Amino acid sequence: MDAIIKSFPPRPDQTAVPAEKSAYMDKPVTNRPSREEAEAAVRILLRWAGDDPDREGLKETPARVVKAYRELFAGYDLCPADELGRTFEEVAGFDDMVVLKDISFHSHCEHHMVPIIGRAHVAYLPDGKVVGLSKIARVVDIFARRLQTQESMTAQIAGAIQEILKPRGAAVMIEAEHMCMSMRGIRKQGSNTITTTFTGAFKEQPEEQVRFITMVRDPRNG
């Protein structure tokens, strides 16, 4: 069962792609507690779950969880502009679509802090310059390693590429399973959510959207 969410033209009080420059040019402002405070919070959660944080198997768990969180949410320490800022202008006149499909990622739902597991497909239409392919995948990873909603993450990736790389257009599709639906609540395993965001020529020319989706879906391209 797939749920499809497609971006539409924004209302006057709503933007489909975040307009804040700091979202792409700077790292998010964070006010982290000390490591000791974080570990104490994990101990409280262990007690809330009904276990004893002082038993042998859990004694080192608070330290392990805090260390894991720094890795899982490393996106707060990274800036997309650092990845997309270095481009190449020797492209031999190439100006057609560049597509990266099946970029796997793990994120966490900002509502329940449980995993979101999925794949991102990203494309852009170069305007005289291209960026290293690995940089696109790293941008996906930067936004994935933050607390997210899938809709926001889709728009953030497209917005960063459009604002920093300045192509003629960008397209992002994300397909993901949300553990907040699979593990709790309605508990529907295998349910995928699909979101898309288009900017520039992709938004203005529906045929470019069709070409992007066709390239993503065509098994011969993967």
Image (cartoon, rainbow, N blue to C red):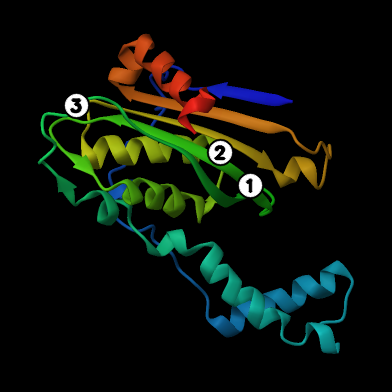
> Would residue 18 be seen by someone viewing this image from the given angle?
no
Between 120 and 148, the residue placed more toward the observer is 120
- How many marks the image carries: the answer is 3
Asked if residue 76 is positioned above or below residue 151 in the image, the reply reads below
Residue at mark 1 to residue at mark 2: CA–CA distance: 8 Å
Between 90 and 195, the residue placed more toward the observer is 90
Asked if residue 88 is positioned above or below residue 186 in the image, the reply reads below
| Residue linked to disc 1 | 116
Between 186 and 221, the residue placed more toward the observer is 221
Give neighbour class at mark 3: few <14, some 14-19, many 20+ (Cα, 10 Å).
Answer: some
> Which numbered disc flags the more N-terminal residue, 3 or 2?
3
Q: Nearer the viewer, mark 3 or mark 2?
A: 3
Query: x, y percentage for residue 75?
Result: 44, 59
Asked if residue 214 is positioned above or below residue 172 in the image, the reply reads above
Query: x, y percentage for residue 10?
Result: 41, 20
User: At label 2, which amino acid type do we have?
Assistant: Gln
Q: Are marks 3 and 2 in contact (CB under 8 Å)?
A: no
> Which numbered disc flags the more N-terminal residue, 1 or 3?
3
Say which mark, if any, is on residue 93.
Answer: none
The image quarter containing residue 89 is top left
| Residue linked to disc 2 | 150
Q: Nearer the viewer, mark 1 or mark 3?
A: 3
User: At label 1, which amino acid type do we have?
Assistant: Ile
Q: Are marks 1 and 2 in contact (CB under 8 Å)?
A: yes
> Which numbered disc flags the more N-terminal residue, 1 or 2?
1
In the rendered structure, the answer to whether residue 160 lies left or right of residue 31 reads left
User: At label 3, which amino acid type do we have?
Assistant: Asp
Query: x, y percentage for residue 28?
Result: 39, 57
| Residue linked to disc 3 | 95
